[in-house]
Every structure is written in C-alpha cells, then in structure tokens.
Image (cartoon, helix red, strand yellow):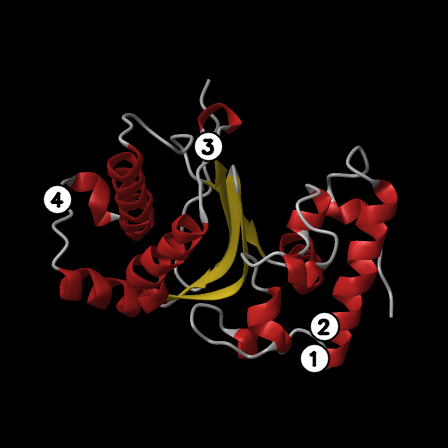
Amino acid sequence: MATKREPFLPNSIYHVYNHGIGDSDIFFEPANYDYFLDLYKKHISPYASLFAFCLLPNHFHLILKIGEYEQIEAFIKKREYHLSGNRYEKVNNKIAQIFGNLFNAYAKAVNKRYNRMGGIFVKSCKRKIVKDEDYLRQLILYVNTNAIHHQLAEEIEEWDYSSFRHIIHKNSFVVDYIQTLSLFNSPEEFRILHENYANEIKKAGKTGPFNFETISVTL
C-alpha cells in the first residue's frame, strides 16, 4: 500500500527531501548543485521562503515556508502554467506539480548533460509539515550539518552546498536568512549551536544517531 503523502498547504512550513533512485547520485559535479539552486529560485522562491537547505551527492533537504494562496495563484498565472483537470482544483496538487516541474527540469538537464536516460529522483517527493518552533530550530541544525553526519566534511563551513554560510554571511541569493536568524536569539547563538551540534555528530560517528531529535545541544 502506498504511503499517504503530506498535502502541500499555503502558509505552512515543510521539510522537503528526496534522494536518487536506489540511493544513486543526483549531483555529479559542482555545476549540478548550482543549477539545482537556480531552478529552485525559478520554480519555488516566488511563492515560498527558504529557512535552510543542504544538497548532498545522493539526496537533498529543504526547509521552507509556502506562501499565501494568492501568491501561488499569481505565480501560476505569471508562468502561464496550464494545470487542467479536477485534481488541480486543489491548491496542494498545484504546489506539488510545481515542485515536480523543478525536479523534472533538473532531471532532463542532467540526462542531457551526461547522455543518460530515465529518472533520477525517487518518484514521490517526501515532505513533512513542521508545526513546532523548537522542532524547526532543531531541524535547521540537522540540515545545515548533514554533510558532517555523512562524513563529507569535518567542519560546517567546509561544505559549499548547505545554507549555513549563506545565513552566517547574510547572502540572500536563495535563503531568507532574516527569517532563519529570527528563530535564534542572535547570529552568535546560531553559530555556536551549529558548532555544538556538529561536535555531537562527530562524537557519534557514522553509525551514531541518525534521528536529529536524539541529539541535544546547548550554549
């Protein structure tokens, strides 16, 4: 039986994530990561704000807030999307289709670039609604340090494809760093909590706790 997916709803926060088919890579060189973010900015940014992200060779994490219903409808009209059929009368299906457009555009470009065929991502984009602010803060720590968990970097700033440096250096290319930092008492607290979280992950090692809720960090 297929697992029921969370509906995408306006004015709601989500953890969106997915991985390659059979855990195969979805990013093969630096230009791929940059192109994915460019597509995110084109397809999603006009009606959503991004708290944090991490792109890794075989999967990605996004924490974002979907905007108001009017923003979504205005975006669909501006892009001249033709979403016909009864299923697109519901706004959650419209949002899911726009995410699908992002992933399809990326897959087509990668297939063309590397002379390959077939899908890249697992078919169903995974998402989990986030309703608790404490959970959201912990999730941001988890996502920004995910490269350390997977032993792709020793320090947070070593991994180019997470939002940590964007937020610390106040780069608004794709991340709403003001929104993210507002969840913490100060930029310094944001930095220290990430460093403490990263240290806990390194102590646990590759076989340590995968569930970020099992790690507790303090100032």
Q: Residue at x 21, y 48 (%)?
A: 89
Marks 2 and 4 in Cβ contact (< 8 Å): no
Mark 1 or 4, nearer chain start:
4
Residue 196, image x, y percentages: 83, 61
- Please identify, in this view, whether the residue under mark 3 or under mark 4 is nearer the observer: 3
* 3D distance between C-alphas at marks 3 and 2: 31 Å
Of the residues shown, which amino acid type is indicated by label 4? Ser
Mark 1, other Cα within 10 Å: few <14 / some 14–19 / many ≥20: some
Residue 152, image x, y percentages: 66, 45
Q: Which residue is mark 1?
A: 187
Q: Which residue is mark 4?
A: 84
Q: Which residue is mark 3?
A: 20
Marks 1 and 2 in Cβ contact (< 8 Å): yes
* 3D distance between C-alphas at marks 1 and 2: 5 Å
- Residue 172 or residue 74, whichever sits in front: 172
Q: Which residue is mark 2?
A: 190
Looking at the image, the residue that sits furthest to the bottom is 186
On screen, residue 46 above or below 154: below
Mark 3 or 4, nearer chain start:
3
